[in-house]
């Protein structure tokens, strides 16, 4: 009996020390966390007015200058690093005419990084807009535009089809030394092409590629009248074609006589 009592007392002492150590460790953790919380709070208060001082533009935009981006975000509150509205900055830069997409992130202590992806212009659309490589219309202007951009025309919503058709037919014609410079899709969905040498091709609404191939096959066989140049070739027939000629010298003489 006495031996059992001694064992119980020993177990009780061991358990008490375990509880004491556990409670002590828990209290230490709470003290450390509390101190950390107050330290972070004090640090945030101290740095709450940290201003944005550096702007880093990534992506190497060609048409959009850094000054354009600075002007775009000038109305955004840049006084506080922590309060900076990244979405507002992103929306401001995205509104610039040449910007296709943009991402913005903050970098401690005073920097914002803006990654810009621009539209790549591949054609003019209906004379007053531009088309990018995805067939997306955008409004922009620049003296840096590449020379010789093709002119594409068509009703609203047809821009992607027009661009894909232009690429297809341009490749066909280029193999045979013809350069396609312009394409138009009418309201009735009839196709017309203009070549660099001044020839206009009327293709109609169906079998565009087949009719272009017919032009390529027949062109070397056409007999040109003296002083005439090919003007319009009408390929809207199931078989055959119709040819119109122009006489630049005669036209020039007529204009001179009127003057």
Image (cartoon, rainbow, N blue to C red):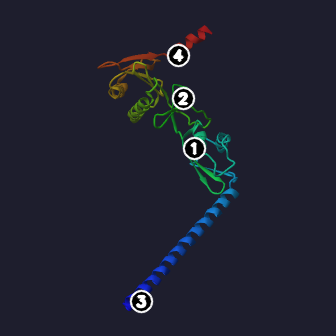
Q: Residues within 10 Å of mark 2 (few under 14, many from 20)?
A: some
The residue furthest front is 1
Within 10 Å of disc 4 (Cα), the crowding (few <14, some 14-19, many 20+) is few
Residue ID for mark 3: 6
Please provide percent x and percent y for residue 156: 46, 24
Disc 3 + disc 1, Cβ < 8 Å:
no
Q: Earlier in the sequence, mark 3 or mark 4?
A: 3
- Do tag 2 and tag 1 residues touch (Cβ < 8 Å)? no
The kind of secondary structure element at disc 2 is strand
Q: Which is nearer the eye, 65 or 95?
A: 95
Residue 29 disc label = none
Give whichever of discs 3 and 1 has the lower sequence position: 3
Where does the N terminus fall, quadrant-wise?
bottom left
Q: Residues within 10 Å of mark 3 (few under 14, many from 20)?
A: few
Q: Quadrant of residue 71?
A: top right
Circle 1 packing at 10 Å, graded few (<14), some (14-19), many (20+), is few
Q: CA distance from mark 3 to mark 4?
A: 130 Å
Question: Given this view, does label 4 or label 1 mark the residue nearer the observer?
Answer: 1
The residue most toward the top is: 258
Q: CA distance from mark 4 to mark 1?
A: 63 Å
CA distance separating discs 2 and 3 = 97 Å
The dot on residue 87 is 1
Residue for badge 4: 249
- Look at 64% across and 53% down and name the residue there: 111
Q: Is residue 141 left or right of residue 11?
A: right
Q: Which residue occupies 64% across, 42% down?
A: 69
Give the alpha-carbon distance from disc 2 to disc 4, as whole Å: 36 Å
Q: CA distance from mark 2 to mark 1?
A: 28 Å
Q: Earlier in the sequence, mark 2 or mark 3?
A: 3
């Amino acid at each position: 009996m006495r031996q059992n009592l001694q064992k119980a007392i020993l177990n009780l002492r061991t358990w008490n020390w375990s509880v004491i150590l556990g409670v002590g460790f828990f209290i230490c953790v709470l003290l450390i966390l509390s101190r950390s919380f107050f330290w972070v709070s004090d640090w945030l208060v101290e740095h709450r007015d940290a201003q944005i001082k550096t702007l880093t533009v990534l992506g190497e935009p060609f048409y959009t200058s850094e000054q354009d981006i600075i002007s775009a975000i000038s109305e955004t509150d840049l006084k506080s690093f922590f309060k900076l509205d990244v979405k507002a900055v992103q929306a401001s830069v995205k509104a610039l005419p040449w910007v296709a997409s943009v991402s913005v992130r903050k970098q401690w202590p005073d920097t914002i990084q803006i990654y810009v992806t621009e539209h790549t212009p591949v054609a003019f659309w209906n004379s007053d807009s531009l088309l990018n490589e995805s067939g997306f219309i955008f409004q922009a202007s620049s003296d840096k535009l590449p020379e010789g951009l093709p002119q594409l025309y068509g009703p609203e919503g047809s821009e992607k089809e027009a661009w894909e058709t232009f690429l297809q037919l341009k490749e066909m014609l280029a193999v045979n030394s013809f350069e396609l410079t312009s394409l138009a899709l009418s309201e009735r969905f009839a196709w017309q092409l203009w070549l660099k040498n001044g020839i206009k091709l009327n293709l109609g609404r169906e079998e565009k590629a087949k009719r272009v191939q017919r032009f390529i096959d027949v062109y070397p066989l056409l007999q040109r009248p003296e002083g005439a140049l090919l003007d319009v070739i009408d390929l809207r027939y199931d078989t055959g074609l119709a040819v119109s000629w122009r006489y630049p010298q005669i036209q020039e003489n007529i204009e001179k006589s009127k003057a």
